[in-house]
Amino acid sequence: MKAVFDHKEKINHNVTTFWWRLPRKVKFTAGQFTELYLPHKNPDERGKKHWFTISASPTNNLWSITTKDAGAKGSSFKKTLFKLKEGAEVDLAEPMGDFVLPKDKSIPLVFVAGGIGVTPFHSIVQYLLDTGEKREIQFIWALNEARDAIFLDLFKKYGIKPVLFVKEKGQSLTSQKILKLTGKAKRIYISGPEPMVETFMEELEKLGVPKNELVGDFFPGYPPI
């Protein structure tokens, strides 16, 4: 479907949110993702299509994606995206994915993010705030640097205090630490670089977390944290 680039919003030193106007109201569930098709000259091996979480809440009339700017080291796709002019038309895929809240509101939840893997949690928490829906949520976040933490005001507003593991401070997040902080009797959502998500999913299952209590959202192309 066609979408028009509305505006962008710089979130921190290397993260920007891009906002899109759609030709019609398209329903989606908080936590789902889309594919952005962005034709450009001389595309590199990363191609003309990338997957992105819809970082906006379904309560917003606009869609958004939130992503990192790798600068000169970035892909031809990312360089094109960051140079887009307002009013530019692109193609977005229909929303998809099952990284969404359980229908049973009584299930305690654990959100585990690696870096920019926070974006589906932004969508979910913004939706919960906008609708006034109450959920029990713990949030654990692995980061390369402390300054990489974004959207903290939003989480604070909902009553979530993220537990941060910052690599530059020598803090590493492990599956054992996740369970020590949260316990097994909870639904665990893990979002971030693909290697991190795969490792945690496998290890937590081996540590006794039922497979149906683990939900993963893989971000391809990002190095582990």
Image (spheres, rainbow, N blue to C red):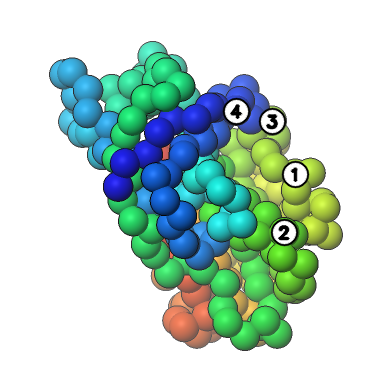
**Which of the two discs, 3 and 1, sits closer to the camera?**
1
At 43% from the left and 69% from the top, the residue drawn is 98
- Label 3 Cα neighbours within 10 Å, binned few <14 / some 14-19 / many ≥20: few
Label 4 sits on what residue type?
A: Glu
Label 3 sits on what residue type?
A: Arg
Of labels 4 and 3, earlier in sequence is 4
In this orientation, does residue 70 appear?
Answer: no
Q: CA distance from mark 1 to mark 2?
A: 16 Å
Quadrant location of residue 9?
top right
Task: Name the residue tied to disc 2.
Answer: 130
Label 1 sits on what residue type?
A: Leu
**Which of the two discs, 3 and 2, sits closer to the camera?**
2
Task: Name the residue tied to disc 1.
Answer: 152
Q: CA distance from mark 3 to mark 1?
A: 11 Å
Q: CA distance from mark 2 to mark 4?
A: 20 Å
Q: Position of residue 142 (x, y in %)?
A: 61, 48
- Label 4 Cα neighbours within 10 Å, binned few <14 / some 14-19 / many ≥20: few
